[in-house]
Amino acid sequence: MELIPQGSALSPILFLLYINDLPTAIHQPIQCGMFADDVALWTSICTSDVNEMDVQLQSLQQSLYKVFIWSNKWKMLLAADKTQCITSRHQILILQHSNLKECDHVKYFGFDHLNYIYGKAAKLVYLI
């Protein structure tokens, strides 16, 4: 089987088709966002009930496990060492047998790119 070389015009389209089913592995209340090869999972916890928070965090951990299973199925390598998380309870989350690094801020390329485009557009509007 011949592979499509990286940098080919077809490569981005084929990659998107290849990972298109990843969000189907994630179930409510966890949400999933994808931008190029970045994937973000999140949930909102709007309660002070400790048990409800634990249930939400367990759902998030289960979704991380499903992403791990999906990656094994499709032979995709995950960069667990580059993966970060923000939790309000200092909960240890695990991906691919590694504890995720907890941070105060996570850089997500999709949002950062939108902010960059917004900044460029705002400068152009100001000039007009």
Image (cartoon, helix red, strand yellow):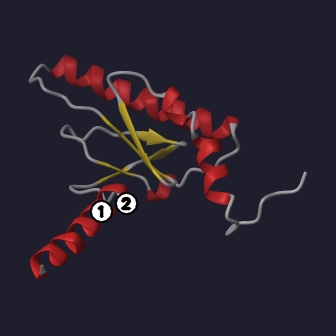
Q: Amino acid at mark 1?
A: Asp
Q: Quadrant of residue 71?
A: top right
Residues at marks 1 and 2 touching, judged by CB atoms closer than 8 Å? yes
Q: Residue at x 26, y 55 (%)?
A: 103
Residue 53 is tagged as none
Residue 73 is left or right of residue 102, and the answer is right
Badge 2 marks a residue whose secondary structure is: helix
State the residue at coordinates (28%, 37%).
Answer: 91
Residue 104 image point, x, y percent: 21, 55
Closest to the observer: 118 or 62?
A: 118
Label 1 SS: helix
Pointer 1 local density, CA inside 10 Å: few below 14, some 14–19, many at least 20: few
**Residue 113 position in % (x across, y down):** 33, 64
The CA distance from mark 1 to mark 2 is 5 Å
- Residue at the farthest front position: 128
As drawn, the label of residue 109 is 2
- Residue 78 position, x and y percent, is 56, 50
Q: Is residue 27 above or below residue 71?
A: above
Amino acid type, label 2: Phe
The residue identified by callout 1 is: 112
